Amino acid sequence: MVRKRLSGLMFLLAVAGCASGQPGLRDAGNSTRHAGLECAPFARELSGIALYGDAASWWDGSEGRYARGQSPVLGGVLVFRRSGRLPSGHVSVVSRLLAPRQIEVIQANWVPGTLDEDQLVVDVSERNDWTAVRVWYPPVNQLGSHEYAAYGFVLPARPATRAELARATRPAVQLAISSRSRAPPRARLVGG
């Protein structure tokens, strides 16, 4: 009897989790440690968007060089504004379009020294324009409680495919880490 009740309870919890749409009940993606990995060099190598400087400067730096928009595309770069929590801003590469207000990203250094693949980002802006987002936080395995201001997306020359992003991620990590000791990147891996 106890086992039957426990089975029923587990079923109800599973159904409630699916129906609730709570991000905390989804697959958290993959996280791997990489000493010295930073968001901007990684996003540059993976996306092929050749911008330099602090992550927040990518928005202004892209003007006249790259298309920009308020809608995500695969391989595009979401640019976060500077804030107390993000003094240099942040950039992440769109890896999957889930719903009009939900995407997944590949990002470096959201958790220091870590590459996070297919992490949930939710648009919480009032105008549905991706100017305010919440981001999955792997250490607690749920959507973070803080809202972050964003500019929008810097768009690649052409949208990437999931397969291209998957193939290019590991080489982009290595190039981004090695770029700290060399001049501009050698090649664009995606979107070029």
Image: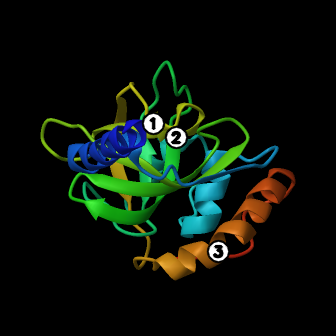
* Residue kind at label 2, given as amino acid type: His
Q: Are marks 2 and 3 in contact (CB under 8 Å)?
A: no
Q: Quadrant of the N terminus?
A: top left
User: SS class of the residue under badge 2?
Assistant: strand
Q: Nearer the viewer's eye, disc 3 or disc 1? A: 1
Q: Is residue 151 visible?
A: no
Q: Earlier in the sequence, mark 2 or mark 3?
A: 2
Residue 21 location (% of width, % of height): 25, 46
Q: How is the image coloured?
A: rainbow
Specify the quadrant of the image occupied by residue 74: bottom left
For the residues labelled 2 and 3, the Cα–Cα distance comes to: 20 Å
Q: Return the mark for residue 32.
A: none
Instruction: Rate crowding at label 1 as few (under 14), some (14 to 19) or many (20 or more) other CA atoms within 10 Å.
Output: some
Q: Earlier in the sequence, mark 3 or mark 1?
A: 1
Q: Nearer the viewer, residue 8 or 28?
A: 8
* Residue kind at label 1, given as amino acid type: Gln
User: SS class of the residue under badge 1?
Assistant: strand
Q: Nearer the viewer's eye, disc 1 or disc 2? A: 1
Q: Which residue is mark 3?
A: 168
Residue at the (30%, 44%) spot, across then down: 8
Farthest-out residue, front: 1
Residue 15 location (% of width, % of height): 26, 49
Q: Is residue 129 visible?
A: yes
Q: Which residue is mark 1?
A: 142
